[in-house]
Amino acid sequence: MLSFHALDDRFTHIGGQRQLFLSAVLAGIALNASSDINHYLSGKARPSAHGLTAKASDDPFFLRSAGEVSSAAWASRAVVLAAADSLDIAARQPENEAAALSAAIDVARAQVAVAD
């Protein structure tokens, strides 16, 4: 068993797991928001007063916005999963600081992509 002091002396993947958890929460919120938008457009939304369509779900402006949200949510999920794979590799090699550093960089990239 490692002492508490020994864990502080080397770089590990633990901090990255905590940070990635926050990004995963944001990605999940985005995915649910995208789902809510699609549900709203398909049944409850009314077309805009100046729109040229009878239904909001046919309005190209609404569809573009829904598509942008969906794309961003999907991309957020993808980068979080990729960073999680890096963390898994680092966790299986606890003595390998290079793997932990690589995972930390991937987590940082995911944070930037998800927060954007």
Image: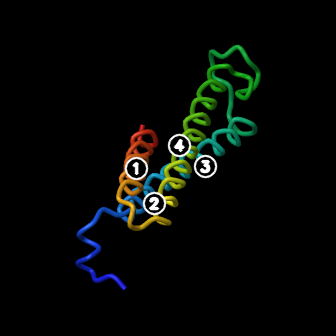
Q: Residue at x 40, y 49 (%)?
A: 102
| Inter-mark Cα distance, 4 to 2 | 21 Å
Q: Residue at x 60, y 49 (%)?
A: 32
| Inter-mark Cα distance, 3 to 4 | 12 Å
Q: Which residue carries the number 1 mark?
A: 102
Q: Which residue carries the number 3 mark?
A: 32
Disc nearest the viewer among 2 and 3? 2
Say which label, 4 or 2, has the lower sequence index: 4
Q: Residue at x 75, y 37 (%)?
A: 42
Say which label, 2 or 3, has the lower sequence index: 3
In the rendered structure, which amino acid carries the disc numbered 2? Ala
| Inter-mark Cα distance, 4 to 1 | 19 Å
Q: Which residue carries the number 2 mark?
A: 90
In the rendered structure, which amino acid carries the disc numbered 1? Ser
| Label 2 CA crowd tier, 10 Å (few <14, some 14–19, many 20+) | many
Q: Nearer the viewer, residue 28 or 60?
A: 28
